[in-house]
Amino acid sequence: MSSTEEDGYRTTMPHYSRLGEGFLLVYSIFSRASFEGIQNFLHGILRYKGLPTVPIVLVGNKCDREDSDEREVTISDIRRTGSREGSRL
């Protein structure tokens, strides 16, 4: 499921969230917007599942690119998010 508006994720998210047993949330380390967007997915999944916790793995994509100086999401950002959400790194 993509987070783009044109993909209609807002209408499909409840369906897939209720059916899923675990989730991979993928963001680009070169896009702060994609990293911040997964926060909505995370909270939406928990809301639709109606559970306090669900197995969710955050995946930073494009780590193999050599232009790492353009990286917008830092390890510190990831740690802060994990700490805030009660996640392990």
Image: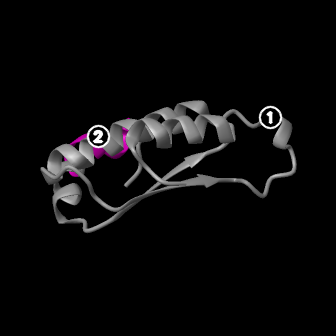
Judging by the rendered image, the residue that carries numbered circle 1 is 70
Identity, as a three-letter code, of the amino acid under mark 1: Glu
Residue 43, quarter of picture: top left
Secondary structure, mark 1, is helix
Which residue is pictured at 57% across the width and 41% down the height?
79
CA distance separating discs 1 and 2? 28 Å
Looking at this view, name the residue that lies furthest to the bottom.
Answer: 21
Residue 43: which numbered mark, if any? Answer: 2
Q: Residue at x 58, y 41 (%)?
A: 78
Q: Is residue 57 above or below residue 45?
A: below
43 or 51: nearer the viewer: 51
Q: Nearer the viewer, residue 16 or 53?
A: 53
Residue 5 on image: x %, y %: 36, 36
Mark 1 residue crowding within 10 angstroms, few (<14) / some (14–19) / many (20+): few
The quadrant of the picture occupied by the C terminus is bottom right
* Residue sitting nearer the eye, 78 or 69: 78
Numbered marks: total: 2
**Is the residue 49 above or below the residue 55 in the image?**
above
Q: Is residue 24 above or below residue 87?
A: below
Is residue 35 in view? yes
Q: Residue at x 12, y 50 (%)?
A: 50
Q: Quadrant of residue 17?
A: bottom left
